[in-house]
Amino acid sequence: MADPSSYRPKPGEIPDTPGVYRFRDEHRRVIYVGKAKSLRQRLANYFQDLAGMHPRTRTMVTTAASVEWTVVSTEVEALQLEYSWIKEYDPRFNVKYRDDKSYPYLAVTMNEEYPRVQVMRGHKKKGVRYFGPYGHAWAIRDTVDLLLRVFPVRTCSAGVFKNAARTGRPCLLGYIGKCSAPCVDRVSAEEHRELADEFCDFMTGRTNTYIRRLERQMAEAADEMEYERAARLRDDIGALKKAMEKNAVVLADATDADLIAVAEDELEAAVQIFHVRGGRVRGQRGWVTDKVEEITTGALVEHALQQLYGEETGDAVPKEVLVPALPDPVEPVQEWLTGRRGSGVSLRVPQRGDKKALMETVQRNAQQALILHKTKRASDLTTRSRALEEIADALALDSAPLRVECYDISHLQGDDVVASMVVFEDGLARKSEYRRFQIKGFAGQDDVRSMHEVITRRFRRYLAEKEKTGEWTDGENAETPEIDSNGEIVGTGLTEDDGRPRKFAYPPQLVVVDGGAPQVAAARRALDELGIDDIAVCGLAKRLEEVWLPGDDDPVVLPRTSEGLYLLQRVRDEAHRFAITYQRSKRAKRFRSSPLDDVPGLGDTRKQALLKHFGSLKKLRSATIDQICEVPGIGRKTAETIAAALAQAAPAAPAVNTATGEIMEEEPGTEPGTEPGTMGSSGEPVTMGAPDERRGQET
């Protein structure tokens, strides 16, 4: 625990201007980012008596080892830089609202020649119009299913669209009237885009125009005694009204606004957001955060606005944003929102009428979300804390292992040997810290030797990173080692640390290996060889779920109901899953290899042209150089190289139907590396060169 006075800037060093400041820990990792109208006044608050600080602020300043700042011209620039740095460094003590899921949006891909309506999650793409977010994907599909009667816009994927265009037959939706079938030229690209524009207009709230138009067309059809057409239009009107009923009118003046409410206590805060478009609630979402320091409701609102609109532009930022409390000062935030939208944005607290009533509804939702979150997390935190304490007691550790790393080796009969490293912090998986390794020190199957290599490479990298931070440096000009992709020291010239998380930079309190006493001994030996004696090691054997410690003849047996054992099992199983996934991807890549891959300068396009011309790799192998030269783009020199490469490669074994013993002829159009091998009883080909997975188990 650091003393803030040890890194407190000298009097007069801090400028009395707007700016953004960063606290770093002993590993130079950024742990907190903040902005201030006056850096001098703001930073002075962090170097007062610790007893008078908020508990979380006290934890932050004692965790930090240094502070630095950047001066900017205006408070708006400070707001923008603060958001950028929080996004870049992901500091652990900053207010970060956590979505419990990725909310789905109804998206229309207006950037395509034939726009498509679909469900989208994640980052927004340029040229795509989004509506929502919705609470559930099925709500989007129900709405789209109703609207396709009136606006038959394409919903199929690119592959389905191309296949329909090639065959000249539309999909089922094209036959039942829920797609205008531009794939078979029933409508032109311009007509289809008009349908997409009308679909978007309806979703933005311009509903009455289309309903009145359909009612007029229905009346005209009835007058002309076209009763079937009139009935179809009647059903279309019903579908539109049913879709509108899903979003009740809450604001009579067709307002476009976002309403943000905050419910908080001393430790946590919940934010609820209602997206109102055209006077109707079009979407809802909620966030929860830990309160790192004593922070006002206005400051919580400011952070919510940053995360909500930090990557939005144009109409995605509404004209009006209603909040429970205004940030202090409000002018820079309002100016920033106006810049994101490109026109004026009103940021205010509703005082009366429908907007105040709707804000009360949003506030009730925020209160319920906070209560629900605290109910879930209380049990979760208690369980995780108990699990870490049980592990510490069972392994005789000085403290609970807040960071646990687990390693597993995976291979198939000694081929494609790989290893995985997974990280759990505070009992939760930290997937951004996961790493994977290829075993390159030797060939063959030796789990113990593989474990020794992986632990050595990982912690050699840690020691190099530790030296880089200056913890082991005697002089200012000490040489810093450069590390290759395998964790080996190859020279000097590492770049300066910029505060972002670095690979292998932080040590665990506990190393878990998937295996028994031999694997544990190998891991301990690797650490001892590197001079590391402050990291505990244990192994979890699969057979009886026994915990092995270095040098012990007998394992530690945790009760089956132990939360500590359950956590170790989760860590071990996650490492196993991560290793298996990597091993399978390498094996699949190896099986897809082809003799053509070894031909220098021969890319995918010319490979496909060769296979298309000859029909299969077997026929290509038997072709002459002159015949290969007939393929467009293949010159004589390249043809000679191809012929030589195919001559050196051993041909695949013939395909055999094991049910009849018949040798099967190669099917035309076989892709490289997938030449038929032995045929199974079902007639499906099995590659002869691949190991039979039924005779070996992935480990």
Image (cartoon, rainbow, N blue to C red):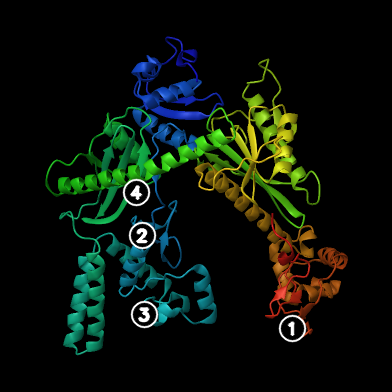
Say which label, 2 or 3, has the lower sequence index.
Answer: 2
> Pointer 4: what residue?
314
| Residue type pointed to by label 3 | Gly
Separation of residues labelled 4 and 3 (CA atoms)? 34 Å
Q: Residues within 10 Å of mark 1 (few under 14, many from 20)?
A: few
| Residue type pointed to by label 1 | Ala
Q: Residues within 10 Å of mark 3 (few under 14, many from 20)?
A: some
Say which label, 1 or 4, has the lower sequence index.
Answer: 4
Q: Do the residues bearing badges 3 and 1 touch, measured as CB atoms within 8 Å?
A: no
> Pointer 3: what residue?
177
Could you tell me if residue 345 is visible in this image?
A: no
Residue furthest top as drawn: 11
Could you tell me if residue 602 is visible in this image?
A: yes
Residue 609 location (% of width, % of height): 71, 70
Q: Nearer the viewer, mark 2 or mark 3?
A: 2
Element on which disc 4 rests: helix
| Residue type pointed to by label 2 | His
Instruction: Report the disc number at residue 136.
Output: 2
**Residue 592 falls left or right of residue 167:** right
Residue 337 location (% of width, % of height): 32, 40
> Pointer 1: what residue?
659
